[in-house]
Image (spheres, rainbow, N blue to C red):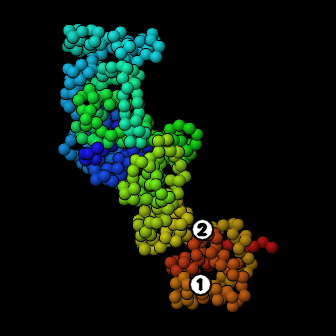
Amino acid sequence: MDRKVRVRFAPSPTGPLHIGGVRTALYNYIFARKNGGEMILRIEDTDSRRFVPGAEDYINESLGWLGIQFDEGVREGGPHGPYRQSERRDIYRRYVKQLLDDGKAYIAFDTPEELEKAREEIPNFQYDASTRMKMRNSLTLGEEETRRLIDAGEQYVVRILIEPGRDVIVNDLIRGEVKINSSIIDDKVLYKSADDLPTYHLANIVDDHLMEVSHVIRGEEWLPSAPLHVLLYEALGWKDSMPEFVHLPLLLKPVGNGKLSKRDGDKLGFPVFPLEWHDPNSGEISSGYREKGYLPEAVVNFLALLGWNPGDDSELLSMQDLIEKFSFDHCSKSGAKFDYKKGIWFNHEYLMRMPDDKLADLFMPVLARKGVDGFDKEYVAHAVGMVKGRADFVDDLWTQADFFFKAPEEYAAKDVKKRWSADTPRIMGELIEVLEGIDDMTSANAEKIVLDWIASKGYHLGNVMNAFRLAVVGSCRGPHMFDITELMPREEVVARIRKAVERIPAPEN
């Protein structure tokens, strides 16, 4: 296709953005950037009954957190606005009229009760060439009666007129040629007079055309709609400007079969939404990747590899890496299992690679929640840098590094039993004297002096060092002991040893 790449992400503001929708937005974004193109955010809010307050802001905030940027949209503006479908009524009316005038659509007055009766009387009923002449519409009523009913205020819909018996071809960049016979496509509703709004099908086609969209990249669940959309492009006279279609593979349950759902996340303990969502109707709170402590770069990397691969063994890919490597040639046709444990692995890897000062910024709010203050950023950065290899999430850093910020109030019983003997208080007293005599408390220097002292006294190295760790940390865990004492003020180290000597009871014989 010899035209500028322009893609769109077009969510409905009916609730929180599902992680599958996030992946669709991501693929649109990296494809556009790969090809020097542009990306549009369009809000498809034609279904007023399902509108949820706050959902549009949630969508914008979610995509912004992940670094997915738009060139045009509800916030950015642009030459093809408005970008909310509810604000484009005048545009859609024009094309509804065109379809009716050209005989490509017709008006139907069937009530819900009449439609239900038809379903009961006609097996496998669908509104199409085989049934439309039995229904109450402009084809059976005639022009005069149709006008009378409209003037009388009777509600109606406009349906596309599908001619049966022809093969409709959809060319998909992932799935190749998809052929559907028009006989199985029903006369879909395109417009409803009740709210003076088009349905998704018409609004989608009109907007994609007028916004000059070159590629429609969306989830596999929309593939059944593609033949109808091809027919609509033809009916409106836009066949030559039809976009390329790309239908992405589904995200599947981690366990079992079927599409990933919120219930899967609730059951297995992982989010299916990018940000925490507070349902304004039910009050229910659903967890989000951001609030769970995931880094946006890790979420992007994880999602990108669900249904696509870079063509080599690389896994850790920045947004720029994804843009450079992306191609639909490496997209899968089959669904991708949502391996949420792999998502945790990605987060660990990105946390490991994060500069310590940036990680300290993320950890500061955790300290505040724990009631800890009085530590400068440099101290915090050194502390988290020592333990981040043991953490998957920022909150995990507290479990691993809490002793840097507060003295132990109790001591691990199993370590006390194994590492604290009758001689330990006396040896710890001697260790205090050694530590207080060291001028240079850098790790390597303090380690040499303490180990030389242990050897000169003939003490058991493991017993002394583990008791030392138990006194300072509260249990036998943590990074290299002398890295700890290099960072922690000497008076704090000494105070903790004295406290342990006072508090840990003498072992029973």
Residue matched to label 1:
447
- Foreground pick, 308 / 402: 308
- Three-letter amino acid code of the residue under disc 2: Glu
- Residue 424 is tagged as none
Q: Position of residue 297 (x, y in %)?
A: 42, 57
Quadrant in the rendering for residue 462: bottom right
Placement of 53 over or under 378, stated as above or below: above
Closer to the camera in the image, 93 or 112: 93
Residue at x-position 43% and y-position 74%: 378
- Camera-nearest label, 2 or 1: 1
Q: Is residue 364 visible?
A: no
- Above/below status of 423 relative to 381: below
Question: Can residue 432 be seen in this snapshot?
Answer: yes
Task: Return the x and y of residue 337 as percentages of the image width and height.
Answer: 53, 45
Alpha carbon distance from label 2 to label 1: 26 Å
Task: In this rendered view, identify the residue nearer to me: 260 or 487.
Answer: 260
Q: Label 2: which residue? A: 409
The amino acid beneath tag 1 is Glu
